[in-house]
Amino acid sequence: MIPAYVPNSAAALFGGGTPIDLGRTFSDGRRVFGDGKTYRGFFGGVVSGVLVGLIEIWAATAFSLSALPQQTFLSVTLLATGALLGDLAKSFLKRRLGKDRGESWFLADQYDLVVGSFLLILIFDPQWLFGTITLPIAVWIVVMTPLLHRVVNIIGYYIGVKEVPW
C-alpha cells in the first residue's frame, strides 16, 4: 500500500499549474474538480508513488524482506495511479455536493485512495489484489489509513504545502 499512500502528499508538493478540468464547469455550474487538481500534481504524485514502489521492490529483494508485499511494476503503478484517480473521483463528488476545495468530508477524505487503488488493481491485476491483501492486511489498511492520513496532512499543513490540516 505504500505506493498508494505517497501520491496524495507528493501531488500537494508538486501541484500547481494547469487544473485537470481546465477551469471547466459541470452541468450543475460547479467546477468539475477545481483548482486543487492539476496535471503537475497528478503526474508528480503518480511518479512519486511508482518510484517509492520500485524502491520497495528493490529493498524487498536486496534485503530479503519477506514481510513486505510482493510488488510488481504493474501493482505499484496501479496503486499509485488508482490513489489519485480515487482522489479525483472524490473531488468530483465533493463539487457535486457543493463542498468547497479543502472542506473536510469525513471518511471520503481518508479512504478515497484505498478505494481508487483497489478498484484499479481489481480491474487490471485482480490476482495481485486477492493474493496479497489478506484479511489481517485489510484490517491494517482500514485502521491505519485514517491515522496516516491525519498525520501526513498535519505535517503538510505545517510545512506549507496544504492549506488545511485535514
Image (tube, grey):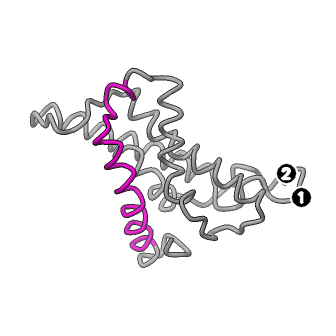
Q: Which mark is residue 107?
A: none
Q: Name the quadrant containing residue 155.
A: bottom left
- Give the percent coordinates (x, y) of residue 33: 71, 54
Q: Which mark is residue 26?
A: 2
In terms of secondary structure, where does tag 2 sit? loop
Which residue is labeled 1 in the image? 29
Which residue reaches farthest top?
Answer: 127
Q: In the figure, 18 relative to 159: above or below?
A: above
Prevailing SS of the magenta stretch: helix
The residue closer to the viewer here, 41 or 132, is 132
In terms of secondary structure, where does tag 1 sit? loop
Residue 141: in magenta span: yes
* Quadrant of the image containing the N terminus: top left
Q: Which residues are magenta?
A: 128-156
Label 2 to label 1, Cα distance in Å?
Answer: 5 Å
User: Pointers 2 and 1 in contact (CB under 8 A)?
Assistant: yes
The residue closer to the viewer here, 166 or 59, is 166
- Give the percent coordinates (x, y) of residue 42: 56, 48
Drawn side of residue 124 relative to residue 67, left or right: right
Q: Residue at x 17, y 38 (%)?
A: 67
- Give the percent coordinates (x, y) of residue 62: 12, 33
